[in-house]
Image (spheres, rainbow, N blue to C red):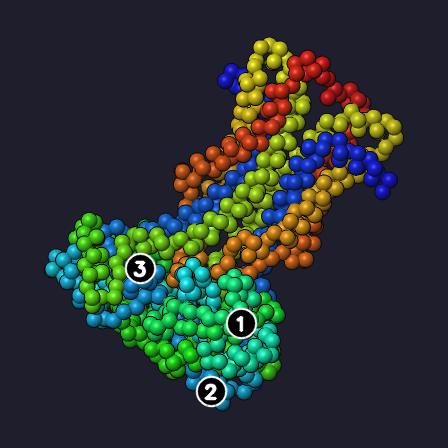
Amino acid sequence: MKYVGLLLKNVRRNKRRTALTVLSVAIAVFLGASLRAVLQGFTGGTEASSAVRTVTLRKTGLFFFMPVTHVDAIRAAVPGVKHVTWASWFGGIYKDPNNFFAQFAIDPESYLRIYPEIQLPADQKEAFIADRTGAIIGEALARRFNLNVGDRMVLQVGIPVYGEQDYTFTVRGIYTPASSVIDNATMFFHWKYLDERSIVKGQTGFLVQELEDPDRATEIAAAIDQRFANSANETKTVTERQFQGTFVSMFGNLNLLLGSIGLAVIVTTLFVAGNTMAMSVRERTTEIAVMRTLGFSGRAIFVLVAGEAVMMAVVGAIVGGVLARVLVSNETLGMTGFIPPFGVSNGTLVEGLALGALIGVLAGLIPATLAARLKIVDGLRRVA
Amino acid sequence: MGLIGHYNLRSMFVRKVTALMTALGIAMVVAVFVMTLALAQGFRSTLIASGSPDNAIVLRKGSTSETVSGFGQDLVPIVETLPQVARDAKGLPLVSPELVLAVALPRVTDGQDANVPVRGVGPHAFAIRERLRFVEGRPFTRGLNEINVGRMATLRFRGLAMGETLSIAGRPWTIVGIFEGEDASFESEIWGDVDLMNPAFQRQGYQSITAKLVSRDAFDAFKAAIAADPRLNLEAQRENEYYAAQSVVMTTVIGVLGTFVTLILSIGAMFGAMNTMYAAVAHRIREVGTLRALGFSRGAVLLAFIAESTALAVIGGVIGCALALPLHGMSTGTTNMASFTEVAFKFRITPALLGAGVAFAAVMGAIGGLLPAIRAARLPISQALREI
């Protein structure tokens, strides 16, 4: 600790260089944290998924409907299932095709029971359930289109099977998601309203079950699929985690893409910061030799040089991390729609600081070792 | 130029380690830049390769993609008989009514289910898409439960090899041929007889009609004829323009992400270059003073240091391009947001992209070198010569 004063003096010696180095580390941490936030946005739904829920789709794929009578069949024939609900993807267009957001036609009562994560004031919930053309929207969606409870929303039909006429909804509630399983920019409305207008009746896109015992999920999923085996509408039931996982993997190998960009960011900064430290040590060769003559040990010199690198890197990391925390979210970046919501969490912030410190240690290691090993005679003999 | 060649470039080699570190920093930025653009370009060119300006695609009026289009079977004969539609040797119109759906199949790589597009096509589909060729087997026979699979799809998904039987919607379909088509998105698809797919998928009607036109110029008349017919609630687009529009969402997302990352990262690398050049100038104050005393103008010194920094960055740029180059031709896949199905495509690194990477590096170097070069040029001679 007694070297702190000396460290601060050294850092201030070449202010411009220090500033440039601090800023380049800040940029690295800023980018690292932003990429991580985006990745977490994509995988958040998977991680937060509940173990007690399973999802049933048509075996053929997401694009196919199944009769809603499957719900009763499951209630009647599959033990271990506490609740069942159903929903359909609507894919409508609100004003402009670019205003993309997810819309699901749901059976309000049973859906909200299975998804307590959709948090809604009790009066709004009641109003929604009571109104056949009512809808609830996520708070981010409400902000994006400046919608309030009581407002009308007209959606054009996107998928021809839902008829030709536009759908008019009344916003009955604005929900906040309690976990990232539920997106904060989705719209839910009554499946009954959809069914009335649809060309084919009594069809739904997928079912969701709540199980009594999460440990029996695989067994129950198999029992559900067995119930519809060899029928015209065979099903495939998976856990909520698997279901969310297929959506993440749809975007391609994000881990690899964002991971390799992140690696490039770190390596670039290492080169920049390491280079700076090497340069400043080289310039101070004579000075270091003098310090050694005065009795500073090799270890003290090592600590001084490495400490300087770590100090610059940590300051940079704090600047970059805080900036990322304040600036990065999909709303500030104007990226809404297909990209799930993201933001820099406290955990990511801490990781960013750790990353900064690591960059400092690695960048300072070689110059500090060289400085500590310097032979006094060589140092004194050298002219800058 | 003499000064740059003799003095600055040689000085760079004197400080090889520092110079190399700076160059490597820039190399990483250029590598990221080239990689993300190669991704966007690959996706774009895959979709663009799917369309031909000689073909027209007809969708329901106002539809932005096949997925949201739909119309009755009775409209096909009206389109078929338009005079702008090309005919084959037997005099039959080259028109393919189509239906696109998706089935869930596990990927070879991670075993996760992905949405693989299944396209029900008319008997002339292969004649209309001239670029498609069979690498194995033969086209499906009309009226039989036979299918053809694109080359990319056979490689990416399980159970799509030649001769295998695929169960779709409870019916068995035999794979009788594998086709390829210059990386077009059709290579990621499964094709079969539209008139069998319709009942199998419990659908009525079609989603699109693709027609080969008598000539490229006939398109305007074709479009006008469809718009003029009150029986048709349809709209024609050139096939290539349609597919180019399908790539916009995805290319924009990749483009925005890539630009965001590379721009910010390039600032970091520029700071690195700046540090290096400031140190270079500080080291060589006496040399700069000598040069000025010998009669080199401030402008020459300024230019020389900017050139040194630019050269350093260009070396970095070339290394960066070399780092990214192995990705060329590597195939990957993503979901095409316009159709919600998976499209396989290859990273495409074109000479123009490499040129852009090096140019980007040069700009970083020039900007990074500017301030240090100004400092070098502004040094008063007397003070510079006195410096130890």
Which amino acid type is shown beneath numbered disc 2? Asp
Tag 1 residue: A149
Q: Chain of mark 3?
A: B
Return the residue found at the far left: B90
Q: Mark 2 and mark 1: span between their CA atoms?
A: 33 Å
Which amino acid type is shown beneath numbered disc 3? Ile
Mark 1 burial class by Cα count in 10 Å: few <14, some 14-19, many 20+: some
Label disc, if present, on residue B178 of the rendered structure? 3
Tag 2 residue: A72
Q: Residue at x 29, y 63 (%)?
A: B61
Q: Residue at x 31, y 59 (%)?
A: B178
Q: Mark 1 and mark 3: span between their CA atoms?
A: 54 Å
Residue B314 is left or right of residue A357, and the answer is: left
Q: Secondary structure at mark 2?
A: helix
| For marks 2 and 1 on the same chain, the one whose residue lies earlier in the sequence | 2
The answer to whether dots 1 and 3 both sit on one chain is no
Label disc, if present, on residue A283 of the rendered structure? none
Mark 3 burial class by Cα count in 10 Å: few <14, some 14-19, many 20+: many
**Percent x, y of residue A136:** 52, 73
Asked if one can make out residue B73 in the rendered structure from this viewpoint, the answer is: yes
* Nearest the eye: A145 or A27: A145
Q: Chain of mark 1?
A: A
Return the residue found at the far top: B294
Q: Which is in the foreground here, disc 2 or disc 1? A: 1
